[in-house]
Amino acid sequence: MCGIVGCIGKKQACPIVLDGLRALEYRGYDSAGVAVIDSNNSAQLFKQVGGVENVARLINSSKKPVKSTVAIGHTRWATHGQPSIENAHPQTNQSKTIFVVHNGIIENYSEIREKLIGQGYKFISETDTEVIPQLIDYHLKKAKSFEQAFIKTLGELRGAYAIVALTTEEPDKLFAARLSSPLVIGVADEELIVASDPAAILAHTKQVVYIKDYEMVVVDSKSYKIHNYLKDTTVKRGTEELDFDSEEFSKAGYPTYMLKEIFEAPATIKSATLGRIRLDPPLVKLGGLERVSSQLKFIDRLVIVGCGTSFYAGLVGEYLIEEIAKIPVEVQLASEFKYRDEPFSRSTALLAISQSGETADTIAALKKVEDYGILRLGVVNNVGSTIARMTDAGVYCHAGPERAVASTKAFISQVVVLAEIALYLSNGTSKLYKPLLSELELLPGKAAELLKQTETIKRIALKYKDDRDFLFIGRHYLYPAALEGALKLKEVAYTHAEGYAAGEMKHGPLAMIDPSFPTLALATDSPQLEKTYSNIQEIKARNGRVVAIATEGNKHIESVADDVIYMPQTAEQFQPILAATVMQLFAYYIAEARGVNIDQPRNLAKSVTVE
Ligand code: M6R
């Protein structure tokens, strides 16, 4: 949530910050702002409600030309206070000499605010962030330097933050710090860029330094200095090279990131299996799990945690790991996991699933078991992210950057990786080992075949564009797939949708069915298909309309469902992968027909870094 960028160097900083904010806009987009300090030490602040372009326009129309080699900027997803100019970042002190952009939440902000009000400070925003520049201002009165006042302030903040500060006191420096919220520095030839996400840096350099918890960094136009403010030690850390291309961050000719990412399904499956599976002799090799392989032999229970789409992928993983590796699995919402007081034995492992690797609830779940001494594993897409770094071992999804708020290719890669983990844990003992490996090899081709039906899926989706409610049903592997399909329709098309286990219909949901409440039934070939037919018949008997997703060649389904979308035959374990693509396209075209902002649905943000 929220994106932050700061730039200092030889070039004009404002265009670099604005470009960085555009690249981060997928993280938050309800208001934005930029602060600069020019060579006369005069500060300018630009803030607007809405997207980054609104701020860019404001800057372009400024009477005083904006010329500066140092700037900070922010694109916001509101937590404290609604989207407004006052609440947008940068937040400042009263004399407007200190400017701060912030991601995360300051939990004790009202306490600090009260204390500062008692000292005569006035606040103009409803944000938690405003306490940061004001508190720095307060400490600056006694501190020897801005750096010292900054560190003193950090010592008083509780919560999660990535902060970048700019001040007229020392306009040739940026001051930044992190605690439980990502922060990275890009080191280019002519400038240094501080950002919450490498996406803001990639156009300028691939050389980056990741900042860790309790570290603050002072950046000037040529160098950076890291200090651990908890231990009061200097940290020496060199740069590392980012391993993705700026091309991966573009829409590549597609109208939206979501459509581009849906169409990346075949490549996504391929790269999640690349170098990991072999057919002759059949073998799954997961380098990321090798160093804990001996510990994994003693695991007799696996708890999977995740949020949203990652949680639903975890539910598919539960079926896969139990069926293939015969290890009992329990999947929990990360946001609930942390409240439970359940017993853990040392032979339990925790597996966190996350596309971004920065989801606050999932991080909190991992933190909760920190002292239990249990193995903590990760299935993460974002290389080098917080979750990737805090787990003992794990498997990367390698899906490449996902920019649309709605997760598409991440779900697909997560399920592929979970299948690989299940096969790996089975140690070749499962009778499914060889057949599933062969099927994994064929899956990218099948996903490509499926995408050829996009026009048919669009035509059928448009028939349902005006429906306000939708039910998604499926059995066994298709049950979590139904939950994920419903989530896609909710978040991109704003259609009320519920995912249900088809077997639950008679236990309640059937009461909702009438001609205005259609159902998407996942009815692909599986041992459960006959039972799903019965559910469809029951819905039809109540004048409900049914769109079925079925396996190619199933002609019978046309006599029971109103509309049928076919997908290639595949193992039932992999049907959620192909069905996900169908449901993503279905939701996409309904959203497009409704004219909503598909990549940036209202009220949401890509990476949920607050609990
Ligand atoms: O980055 P994560 O996978 O941890 O994110 C979890 C959820 O916030 C995410 O899947 C969310 O539900 C998506 N918007 C779903 O499309």
Image: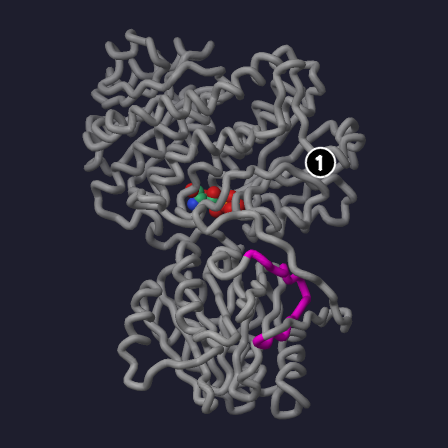
In this picture, residue 263 sits left or right of residue 155? left
Q: Looking at the image, is 527 positioned above or below residue 582?
A: above
Q: Residue shown at 40%/21% (left/top)?
A: 502
User: Please, which colouring scheme is shown?
Assistant: one colour
Residue 203 spot, x, y in % from top left: 47, 58
Quadrant in which residue 114 is drawn: bottom right
Q: Indicate yes or no: mark 1 CB to ligand 1 under 8 Å.
A: no
Residue 414 showing in the rendered view: yes
Q: Residue shown at 29%/50% (left/top)?
A: 597
Number of numbered labels in the structure image: 1
Q: Is residue 43 magenta?
A: no
In this picture, residue 586 sits left or right of residue 579? left
Q: Residue shown at 46%/32% (left/top)?
A: 267
Q: Which is nearer the eye, 116 or 275?
A: 275
Quadrant in which residue 567 is drawn: top left
Residue 49 spot, x, y in % from top left: 32, 68
Residue 165 spot, x, y in % from top left: 54, 76
Residue 94 showing in the rendered view: no
Helix, strand, or loop for circle 1? strand
Residue 135 spot, x, y in % from top left: 57, 82
Residue type indicated by callout 1: Ala
Q: Residue shown at 33%/53% (left/top)?
A: 602
Q: Looking at the image, is 529 positioned above or below residue 482?
A: above
Quadrant in which residue 180 is drawn: bottom right
Circle 1 Cα neighbour tier, 10 Å, few/some/many (<14 / 14–19 / ≥20): many
- Provide the residue designation for mark 1: 349
Q: What stretch is highlighted in magenta?
A: 206-221
Q: Looking at the image, is 199 positioned above or below residue 193?
A: above
